[in-house]
Amino acid sequence: MSIVLHHSIHGNTGQTLIVLHGLFGSLDNWKTQCQQLAEHFTVHALDLRNHGQSPHDAKMSYPSMAEDVLQYIKSQPLNQVCLLGHSMGGKVAMELALTHPSTVSKLIVADIAPKPYPPHHNEIFDALQRIDLATLKSRREADEQLKNRIDSPEVRGFLVKSLYRQDNKQFNWRFNLPVLIDQYAHLAAAPSHRGPFTGPTLFIKGGTSDYITQGDEKVIHQYFPAAQFKLIQNAGHWLHAEKPEVFTHIVRKFLLN
């Protein structure tokens, strides 16, 4: 059963672009890029299920998440849309393009490939579970606790953005941590290998990230035969946050061509 997704809309011109965030993220992470892209496009940023302000659900598979996005498209209603997805959101975008190709005019995938990945979020899950939300006083305190297991200040800063105060003033995570842990095998899996999606497709890779390797190009072209590739030098997996101007320029140029 699909979920009604929380969303924000920027601009009212040109093609419709739907933006899908990654694991632990939300549409708030994309506010700057959405505002810049809204000069040329009507941009819909979505909170995926179990993230941001969208409802929580026990299921967290790519078919279920793609169905949520499809129902959002129908509810607006929108015709063909351009999709931009980062990491987990990129897999959701690929899932939708492969299973409902007539819905998607152009596809942009940021730093993820259509393949299964070995577990590599265990340290983050462990660190998040160790935070005592009942006694937590501030985001700064959460950052201090996360330091014991997460070295990167950028990753810690990204995570604590999802802390919010409930009506009882106690902190909680916007993302549904128990379900993300329980359903992680589905999140590490590849999207459905149907398709192919033959429309214009762009994969953007971070120069210092290993999420997309040279060997992945074969499987990418198998399912996305029109795929092009762009590399952002000196950017890691969070390439849109590390090099926002370069990233937005690449997206804008691809969509306008």
Image: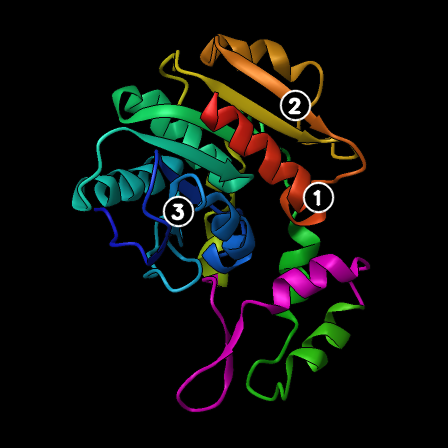
Q: Is residue 238 visible?
A: no
Residue 78: percent from left, percent from top: 22, 37
Q: Which is more toward the observer, 8 or 11?
A: 11
Above or below residue 257? Residue 64 is below
In screen coordinates, is 16 left or right of 253? left
Q: Residues within 10 Å of mark 3 (few under 14, many from 20)?
A: many
Q: Is residue 187 magenta?
A: no
Residue marked by disc 1:
243
Q: For residue 54, which quarter of the picture?
A: bottom left
Residue marked by disc 2:
230
Residue at 50% in and 8% down: 222
Query: Closer to the N terminus: mark 2 or mark 1?
Result: 2
Q: For residue 96, which quarter of the picture?
A: top left
As measured in the structure, the alpha-carbon distance from the residue carrying label 3 to the one carrying label 2 is 29 Å
Q: How is the image coloured?
A: rainbow
Tell me the amino acid under the disc marked 1.
Answer: Lys
Residue 189: percent from left, percent from top: 50, 32
Q: Which is more toward the observer, 248 or 209?
A: 248
In this rendering, the label closer to the viewer, 1 or 3: 1
In screen coordinates, is 41 left or right of 80? right
Residue at 30% in and 54% down: 5
In screen coordinates, is 9 left or right of 133? left
Residue 212: percent from left, percent from top: 66, 26
Residue marked by disc 3:
60
Q: Residues within 10 Å of mark 2 (few under 14, many from 20)?
A: some
Residue at 41% in and 33% down: 83
Tell me the amino acid under the disc marked 2.
Answer: Lys
Tell me the amino acid under the disc marked 3.
Answer: Met
- Judged from the image, the secondary structure of the residue bearing numbered disc 3 is loop
